[in-house]
Image: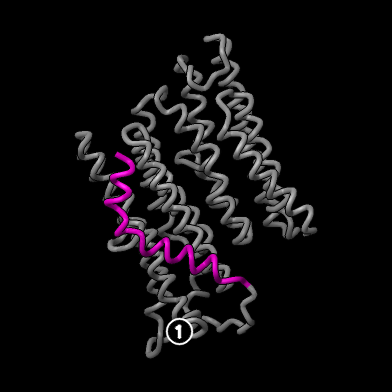
Amino acid sequence: MNPFVLLTLLSSLGLGTTLTFASSHWLLAWMGLEINTLAIIPLMAQHHHPRAVEASTKYFLIQATAAAMILFAGTTNAWITGTWEMTNMSSPIASTMIIFALALKIGLAPMHLWMPEVLQGLDLTTGLILSTWQKLAPLALIMQTAQDINPLLLTALGLLSTLIGGWGGLNQTQLRKILAYSSIAHMGWMIIILQYAPQLTLLALLTYIFMTSAAFLTLKMFSAMKINTLTTVWTKSPILSVTTALVLLSLAGLPPLTGFMPKWLILQELTKQDLPAIATVMALAALLSLYFYLRLCYSMTLTISPNVNNSTTPWRTAATQTSFSLALLTTAALALLPLTPAILMLTT
């Protein structure tokens, strides 16, 4: 792709998200989301592969549907209340439509079915943008309107996303689909705590971005698309194999890694809010996710000789990717747990 075109598209991505962040008016927020959608579609379809074109078309249709729902809900709210302000969502119909539209935008269950299919058709770099940057604007809108949304609805969306994100990934062999289900599960953790402690939603989002970016960049370094490919990477880069296994366990939320911090604090907050049953279900749902992360770790680290390995060895081409960002993100994904007391002090 022409560098100037790429720069324009990436600038538009940034502009769309910033516009949505800065807006308190539904029309302006809708405009930001539309710019965002239109900017990422050329990036998705740039390889002209049938799967990429299919993924771009699916993504466009889903995002256009969600944007139309947001516009309709904003118009309904303006008709009832006489204002387009986000802070005045007194109509329950409009606020319910808004949360469903935004859930469709970020792939919360039960509006999640497009996410694994779209991510499977993309290359890893565009997949990384879709899994991290594209979540920011809709999540900002959910956070701004959370006080007007039925708490039971948010809890149901969060629980369902965590459970489906865990269940969906169990039977997958494609790494991009596994990361898509991982993303759905993490979004569930963010949404369930939103009404009680929005600062923990932000913390969970930040750690999720670190861990997912590290995972995507590592897979890009390995040129790995399937679990099968992971069985031969230890000979190519043993140290990176070790750190990748740790990043995956961090995504699963095991101590003493960074991923444990948001899960620990969210479960603690749910217990404080007198919701032990929900906290228990969330902890058990995390075990489902842990299983498929452990599958990946097993493929990477426990298929070493003398065990038999039946997969073909890939060509050893020189890596052209810069490893500085990967090193930085891997460190952030593994070693931030000791900062928990400082983060607690800042967020309370």
Identify the residue under disc 1: 309
Compared to residue 139, the image places residue 233 above or below, namely below
Q: Residue 280 in the image: state x and y as whole percent.
A: 23, 45
Residues 343 and 198: in front is 343
Residue at position x 55%, y 35% in the image:
21
Quadrant including the N terminus: bottom right
**Looking at the image, which residue sits at the far bottom?**
306
Give the residues in magenta.
321-348
Is 203 part of what is drawn in magenta? Answer: no
Q: Nearer the viewer, residue 186 or 260?
A: 260
Residue at point 66%, 40% (across, down): 15
Report the front residue among 137 and 332: 332
Q: Percent position (x, y) of residue 77?
A: 54, 15
Q: Position of residue 284 (x, y in %)?
A: 27, 51
Residue 162 higher or lower than 104, as above or below? below
Question: Residue 323 colored magenta?
Answer: yes
Report if residue 62 is visible in the image.
Answer: no
Which element carries disc 1, helix, strand or loop? loop
User: From the image, which quarter does the C terminus lie in?
Assistant: top left
Q: Residue 262 or 93: which is nearer the viewer?
A: 262
* Colouring rule applied to residues: one colour
Indicate left or right for 43 with 117 as reference.
Answer: right
Q: Main secondary structure of the magenta part?
A: helix
Q: Residue at x 54, y 65 (%)?
A: 325
**Does residue 316 lie above or below 155 as drawn?**
below
Q: Is residue 168 left or right of residue 342?
A: right
Name which residue type carries label 1: Asn
Q: Residue at x 47, y 61 (%)?
A: 172
